[in-house]
């Protein structure tokens, strides 16, 4: 087991790793839509923030020797399911016809006032 860390994704905001590589898998911690250059939540629409979260996941997977094309499962946490179709539209651009298994859950709140967080599991 090894920790995965890259400066191309936002630093963890608590006592956890950006990702863990173990037994041929990479487990990516939930990624808020934080721009790693500014340390702030991405501006714009929920689509823009979905894209930022996915780009963060992609950078962590890349650091682990994996990639978005090897994602097998994601979990999306949103604070407003009424924006579900917009999230799907942005999310779908990352996977095409080979989308991984997924769950989407509405939550009361997310850290830093974010409205979306995405975690992922991928193979190496």
Image (cartoon, rainbow, N blue to C red):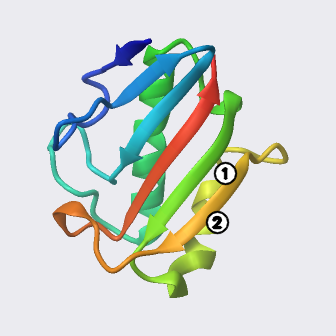
- At horizontal 17% and vertical 36% (from top left) the residue drawn is 15
Q: Are marks 2 and 1 in contact (CB under 8 Å)?
A: yes
Q: Is residue 41 left or right of residue 71?
A: left
Q: Quadrant of the N terminus?
A: top left
Q: Residues within 10 Å of mark 2 (few under 14, many from 20)?
A: few
- At horizontal 40% and vertical 76% (from top left) the residue drawn is 107
Secondary structure of residue under mark 1:
loop
Residue ID for mark 1: 93
Q: Residues within 10 Å of mark 1 (few under 14, many from 20)?
A: few
Distance from the alpha carbon under mark 2 to that under mark 1:
7 Å
Residue at the right extreme of this rendering: 97
Report x, y in % for residue 57.
Answer: 46, 37
Residue ID for mark 2: 89
Residue 20 in the image: above or below residue 95: above
Residue 108 in the image: above or below residue 6: below
- At horizontal 66% and vertical 51% (from top left) the residue drawn is 93
Residue 51 in the image: above or below residue 87: above
Report x, y in % for residue 92.
Answer: 68, 55
């Amino acid at each position: 087991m090894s920790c995965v860390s890259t400066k191309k994704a936002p630093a963890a905001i608590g006592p956890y790793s950006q990702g863990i590589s173990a037994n041929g898998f990479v487990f990516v911690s939930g990624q808020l839509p934080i721009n790693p250059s500014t340390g702030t939540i991405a501006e714009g629409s929920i689509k823009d923030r979905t894209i930022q979260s996915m780009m963060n996941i992609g950078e962590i997977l890349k650091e682990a020797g994996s990639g978005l094309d090897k994602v097998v499962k994601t979990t999306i946490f949103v604070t407003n399911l009424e924006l579900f179709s917009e999230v799907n539209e942005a999310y779908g651009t990352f996977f095409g016809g080979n989308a991984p298994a997924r769950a989407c859950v509405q939550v009361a709140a997310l850290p830093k006032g974010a409205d979306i967080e995405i975690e992922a599991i991928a193979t190496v």
